[in-house]
Image (cartoon, rainbow, N blue to C red):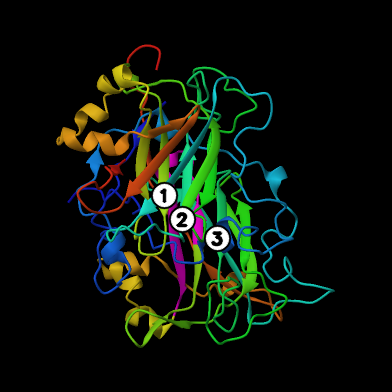
Amino acid sequence: MVQPLSYLKESPSQTAGPYVHIGCTPNFAEINGVYPHDLGHRMITGEVQGQRIRITGRVIDGTGTPLRDALVEIWQPDAAGLFNSPGETRGTADPHFTGWGRCPSDMTTGEFAFDTVKPGAVPYVDGRPQAPHVTLWIVARGINLGLHTRMYFPDEAEANAADPILSRIEHQVRVATLIGEAKGEGHYHFDIRLQGHNETVFFDI
Amino acid sequence: MTNGFVNRDRRWHPPAITPDYKTSVARGPRHAPLSFPTTLVEETGPVFGHDMLGKLDNDLILNFAKDGGMAIGPRIIVHGQLRDEFGRGVPGALIEVWQANAGGRYRHKKESYLAPLDPNFGGCGRCITDAQGYYEFRTIMPGPYPWPNTMNDWRPAHIHFSIFGQGFAQRLITQMYFEGDPLIWHCPIVDTIPTREAIESLVAPLDMARTVPMDARAYKFDITLRGRRQTMFENRMEGL
């Protein structure tokens, strides 16, 4: 006999369902007066450092139809590569930037949008820089476990080529699914494909 | 010192495609996900201060009620501890909940069930865990309701939970069920979870010890997030 490890198991995931807005963005769901505003609707809270950018996108199902009931969250460092989080021990992040955003898909077009700043680079576990990117988390009816992925920037080809995560992808043809599309000055578009030959690379992290 | 999160046991969670829950068929990814060690990106996350909360945020009986009214339904307290896989309480974590009213109807424009809305019930609440990871809500017992999947599927009574931990990799959405609800074992969404043991970890027992006499019953729902490795022996390179 040996001692039991007695560790706990993570609570199993369940779908966010069609009414995720009630809990996470109640004002968007027209439940007004409970919270003053929906959390994560604003990432920039003052005179922010760095380049302001806008990220738009859609979450698209296996039939090519954009989801109109998804919820997308993004998490990223500031322009200097620092996180506004107690877990950040390398320095102090820009106080006018939260790093976290939350946006429901538009109920008609399925589009989400974030007004943010272009993130700086963050080190990988071995010290190599990771190319600038935002990390995304997607939940919706029909998604049983929240999906993690990243959007990298099309104007960072050199950094992307050296990125430790992108280079781990066995089928390099799929790297393109993680690169946003430049739509104009400071505007990037990122479609997330849940299935199909362009299925976005999702992460087990 | 931290050294990343314990790998997520993906066999414990529902798989991406679960044909009996039809919506997953066109929405679940087909490819295997890419595995890599958590980095600072995944080990950090947003923080939410207690000062953000309104005093009724965790009271769904009153937080949408008008003119001294109250939400209709059996009054309950839902409480528990948020901890990680090593049993450590997770303090300062935001928990958001949402649910149907006592008749099984959600306050949402896409909802069409014939049960009536309750004018005094919005259906959302939130709180932040205390220094030991404990949390508490007051609400009404949600009703079960039918949903379009096969021609006769019913959701057991449930409360949706959205949980932030200390790192973005811990982000989790799940649902709490109630002890003794026979619909749990007929629900295709519950059944996406592969094992009975894992399903039972989402079923909150009646907690007579925390019941408020002549007022509200209590259910205890402990939630577990991924464990954070800790070691005195740091194996990262200088400066990380």
Q: Quadrant of the C terminus of chain B?
A: top left
Q: Are marks 3 and 2 on the same chain?
A: yes
Q: Mark 2–mark 1 contact, CB under 8 Å?
A: yes
Residue A152 sits inside the magenta stretch = no
Question: Where does the image place residue A192, in percent across and percent down from the top left?
Answer: 35, 47
The reply, left or right, for residue A129 in relation to residue A55 is left
Mark found first going from the N terminus, 1 or 3: 3
Callout 3 secondary element: helix
Q: Residue at x 32, y 51 (%)?
A: A6
* Residue sticking out furthest to the top: B238
Check the residue under mark 2 and report the chain it is in: A
Q: Which residue is mark 2?
A: A110
Task: Between label 3 and label 2, give the one nearer the viewer.
Answer: 2
Callout 2 secondary element: loop
Check the residue under mark 1 and report the chain it is in: A
Against A161, residue B223 (above or below) is below
Mark found first going from the N terminus, 2 or 1: 1
Tell me where the magenta segment starts and ends, as one range. B161-179
Three-letter code for the amino acid on which mark 3 is drawn: His
* Residue sticking out furthest to the front: A184
Against B109, residue B168 (above or below) is above
Residue A21, numbered label:
3
Please name whichever residue, B219 or A38, is drawn nearer the observer in this view of the structure.
Answer: A38
The reply, left or right, for residue B163 in relation to residue A32 is left
Q: Residue at x 25, y 63 (%)?
A: B17
Q: Which residue is mark 1?
A: A58
Q: Residues within 10 Å of mark 2 (few under 14, many from 20)?
A: some
Q: Quadrant of the N terminus of chain B?
A: top left
Callout 1 secondary element: strand
